[in-house]
Image (tube, helix red, strand yellow):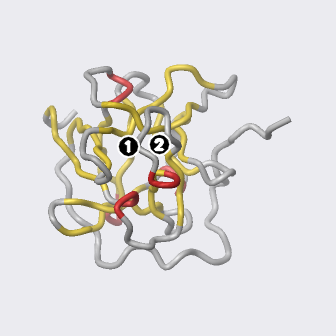
Amino acid sequence: MKKEATPRDATTPESTSKGAPGGALDIEEGIYKIYTALNQRSIVDMAVSGSEQRVHRIKLYHDNSSLESTWALSRRPGGYYLLINQREKDLAAGEMNNNTVGASPITERPAQHWMFKDAGLGLVYLENRYDGKVMDVEGSHMEDNSSIIDYRHVGSANQKFKLFKIDGPK
């Protein structure tokens, strides 16, 4: 039986990854779609169904206008942001205990805090506060429902994303 993904602990691990190079970018708060640099047509999306603990898988999906495909960027201290899903506005993207990225109830723990870093050409890395790993499209797959994971920064296209603002501050 496969162990269910659960949110990361509230504290940071003993050692963290180096993370993406550079400092934090200042991104305007608002509602965004987050496109992968792999094809710039697929977006970061939240699965509609979740576990009993309200943990929803985060995955790649074709561009659409569904609320589960949009994210509010809400600024936090230190250059970090919460990525709040717009279908269920009390869920934020964060690292899970199995190195996947999932949406779970907002707790403000480090695993739900993301820093945007410049990846060049208008693209960004999303670096997690918990351990310095970055958001990554697993295996560079571009099919619908491909997994979004956290992985050490290597600078590949599957770790780069394009933000597209669709609405103002919320």
Asked if marks 1 and 2 touch (Cβ < 8 Å), the reply is yes
Decide which of 53, 121 is in the foreground and name it. Answer: 121
Q: Which of disc 2 and disc 1 is earlier in sequence? A: 1
- Label 2 amino acid? Ala
- Which residue is disc 2 drawn over? 93
User: Viewed as shown, does residue 121 lie left or right of 144?
Assistant: left
- Compared with residue 70, is residue 17 higher up or lower down, i.e. above or below? below
Image point (30%, 51%), residue name:
75
Decide which of 30, 95 is in the foreground and name it. Answer: 95
For label 1, the SS is: strand
- Compared with residue 157, is residue 6 higher up or lower down, i.e. above or below? above
Where is residue 91 drawn, in percent x and y?
Answer: 48, 32
The numbered mark at residue 83 is 1
Q: Quadrant of the C terminus?
A: top left
Image point (15%, 33%), residue name:
166
User: Viewed as shown, does residue 124 lie left or right of 49?
Assistant: left
Q: Quadrant of the N terminus?
A: top right
Number of labels in the image equals 2
Residue 65 lies in quadrant: top left
Decide which of 102, 81 is in the foreground and name it. Answer: 102
Image point (52%, 52%), residue name:
138
- Residue neighbourhood size for the residue with mark 2, other residues' Cα within 10 Å, grouped as few (<14), some (14–19), many (≥20): many
Image point (51%, 47%), residue name:
94
- Label 1 amino acid? Leu
Where is residue 38 drawn, in percent x and y?
Answer: 32, 52
Where is residue 59 drawn, in percent x and y?
Answer: 47, 38
How far is the residue under mark 1 from the one under mark 2?
5 Å
